Structure formats: C-alpha cells, structure tokens
Amino acid sequence: MEKGRHLVVLNMSTESFSKNRGRKSSDIWSSSHVSDENMRRLDRLANLGTLSAGVAHEIKNSLTAIKTFIELLIQKGEDKELAGVVAKELSRIDAIVSQMLKFASPRPPAFATVQIHDVLDHSLRLLQHHISGKMISVKHDYRAKPATARADEAQLQQVFMNLLLNALEAMGANGTLIVSTDIAENGGKKDIVIKIRDTGIGIPNENLPRLFEPFFTTKKNGTGLGLAISQGIIQDHHGKIEAHSEVYKGSTFTIWLPAA
Ligand code: ADP
Ligand code: MG
C-alpha cells in the first residue's frame, strides 16, 4: 500500500515537472525550425532552471511520503524517540528543498515602472568598492528621455551588475568604464538603449558566438552563467542584448529595452 501511494506521488510530480512554465523538454529539443542559435541557448538555460526545479519537486514529494510514514510510526508508538529524530531531520530537509524550489524556479518578471538611470546608479554604487580599488574612472552619458521602462527592477539590477562586474574584471588599473543611455526608434515605438563599455582586454572573435552560452567562461573561477542569465532576463523583458569587442581595446554590451 505504501509502495502504491509512493508511485502515485512520483507520477504527479513528473507531470507537474513537464508542465513547468508551460514547456515540455520535447518542445525544446524538437524546435529545429528555430534557426536562431540564441533562441536555442535561451531554451537550454530555461531548461536548466526547469530541471533543477523538477529535481527539487521529486525530492520534496518523496519527503512528504516518508514524513507521512514516520508520523504513522509515531502514532503506533513504535520507538517514538527514534522516529521523532527522523521526523525532525526530515522537516529540516523539507524546509531546505522548499527554499531551493523558491530560488531555482525561473521567476517571470514582476513588471512595474522603473527609472533606468536610478537602477544603473544604484548598481554602480554597489560596485563602488571594486571601482575605486582598481582606480577605474567612470563616465556617465545619460541621454535617454524618458528613461522609464516597464520592468522588474531586481532582475534589471542583476543584469547591470553582471555586465558591470564583467567590465571591471576585464580591466586592469586605470581603465575607463562608460555607462550611457539613449533612445532609438523601433518600428514606431521607442527603445531605451543602454551601453556598458570598458577599456579592457576585449573578446577574441572566436569567443563572441559563445558568450551567452550557459557555462561558457574563460575565467579561472568563472561560472559562465552571468551573461546567459542576463540574456534570459532581457528576453523576458521583450528586449535584446548584444556584444561588440576589439581585442586589447575593450568591449561594449548593448541592451535595447522597450520604453514605457
Ligand atoms: P563569467 O564572468 O563567470 O566568466 P559570464 O557569463 O559573465 O561568466 O561571461 C562569460 C565570458 O564572457 C567571460 O568568461 C569572458 O570570457 C567573456 N566576457 C564577458 N564580458 C566581458 C568583457 N566585458 N570583457 C571581456 N570578456 C568578457
Ligand atoms: Mg560574469
């Protein structure tokens, strides 16, 4: 009987796993008609998030089944003390997995009106320590008017921090970081254009097509996730992100976001 219930629990979780964010893994891998390489990269990344959330779901469902079983044991009074210890440990694991699920699931943006220049300034302030430590000079050229977008402020900040950190990591002492914004027409609508430019080591041509790939890194302690996650966030905001670079001269990352 216990075995039967356990099976039902697992089936349920498999179903909810494939329904996650409305995309089945088969949808992702059968999308051969999508020729855009970037789309496939984004799908792979979305799949990664879905996968970890799916695994956490499986573990959580097993935990629930075991917990019910232990509670039954306690009720029956068989080795209450031992069962109590097991139950307590299970609750702890349950809490950890719940927290993991909360963070591992790709969260759709919570859109609100956001002042882009404020988010850029705030991100720069958070990195002030890095900037002054390396004697980097920062130049702003904020031209976008209006500079408001419908966006998830926390997610945009995550993108700006990723790009600014990469820029700082690419430069030695006395580099220059240039943060600029402007407005561009896009089919009768307006885009806010955000550029983050550095005078760092640059990116070799052969690496440019791989930059936004999850786990692509040239750094000893890099994760290779910053740009992949950033691209996912910008796509969720109906925008786009591109990189241009010249080796030994520096790199520019440009983001287009629909203006509010
Ligand atoms: P990580 O920073 O952990 O390596 P990212 O996804 O942020 O991962 O970046 C991936 C790779 O792209 C980096 O390892 C680096 O090779 C390259 N890159 C990104 N931004 C820059 C930059 N501003 N200048 C030079 N290389 C860069
Ligand atoms: Mg990075």
Image (spheres, rainbow, N blue to C red):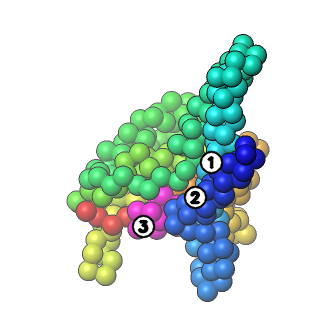
- The residue indicated by pointer 1 is 57
How dense is the environment of label 1, judged by Cα within 10 Å: few (below 14), some, or many (20 and up)? many
Q: Report the span colored magenta.
A: 231-244
**Which residue lies at the image location 70% right of the left edge and 18% below the top edge?**
77
Q: Is residue 1 visible?
A: yes
Q: Secondary structure at mark 2?
A: helix
How dense is the environment of label 3, judged by Cα within 10 Å: few (below 14), some, or many (20 and up)? some
128 or 151: nearer the eye? Answer: 151
Cα separation, mark 1 vs mark 2, equals 9 Å
Quarter the C terminus occupies: bottom left
Which percent across, then down, holds residue 240? 46, 68
**Which residue lies at the image location 40% right of the left edge and 62% below the top edge?**
237
125 or 233: nearer the eye? Answer: 233
Magenta residue check for 232: yes
User: Which quarter of the figure has residue 15?
Assistant: bottom right
Q: Are marks 3 and 2 in contact (CB under 8 Å)?
A: no
Q: Are marks 1 and 2 in contact (CB under 8 Å)?
A: yes
Identify the mark nearer the N-term, 3 or 2.
2
Identify the mark nearer the N-term, 1 or 2.
2
- The residue indicated by pointer 3 is 239
Disc marking residue 16: 2
